[in-house]
Image (cartoon, helix red, strand yellow):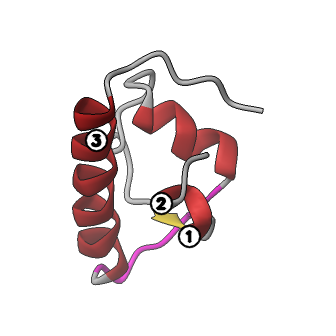
């Protein structure tokens, strides 16, 4: 279970940014699948999604409970 200690508005902004990042990666010819853990690390700001071109297969990362 992932415990998020951020304000809802901040988290929603990060999820929106991640969706834009993922869409741009999906349009790219180079793809690397992300694990759900890597997606959450991006959301938490612990990883830079621009290090390499990545595409997230864990689409349920949008629904954070």
Q: Is residue 53 magenta?
A: no
Secondary structure beneath label 3? helix
The residue tagged 3 is 14
Q: Residues within 10 Å of mark 3 (few under 14, many from 20)?
A: some
Q: Quadrant of the N terminus?
A: top right
Q: Are marks 1 and 2 in contact (CB under 8 Å)?
A: yes
Above or below, comparing residue 13 to residue 32 in the picture: above
Q: Residues within 10 Å of mark 2 (few under 14, many from 20)?
A: few
- Asked whether residue 50 appears in the rendered view, the answer is no
Mark 3 vs 2, N-terminal side: 3
- Asked whether residue 6 appears in the rendered view, the answer is yes
What are the residue bounds of the magenta stretch? 28-34
Image spot of residue 48 (x, y percent)? 35, 33
The residue tagged 2 is 62
**Alpha carbon of mark 1 to alpha carbon of mark 2: how far?**
6 Å
Which circle marks residue 3 in the picture? none
Image spot of residue 20 (x, y percent)? 22, 64
Above or below, comparing residue 64 to residue 47 in the picture: below
Above or below, comparing residue 52 to residue 29 in the picture: above
- Total labels: the figure holds 3
The residue tagged 1 is 59
Q: Residue at x 31, y 23 (%)?
A: 7
Mark 1 vs 3, N-terminal side: 3
**Alpha carbon of mark 1 to alpha carbon of mark 3: how far?**
15 Å
Residue at the outermost top position: 5
């Amino acid at each position: 279970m992932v415990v998020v200690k951020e304000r809802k508005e901040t988290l929603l902004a990060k999820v929106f940014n991640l969706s834009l990042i993922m869409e741009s990666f999906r349009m790219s010819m180079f793809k690397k699948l992300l694990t759900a853990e890597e997606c959450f690390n991006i959301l938490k700001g612990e990883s830079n999604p621009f290090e390499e071109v990545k595409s997230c297969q864990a689409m349920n990362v949008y629904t954070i409970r």
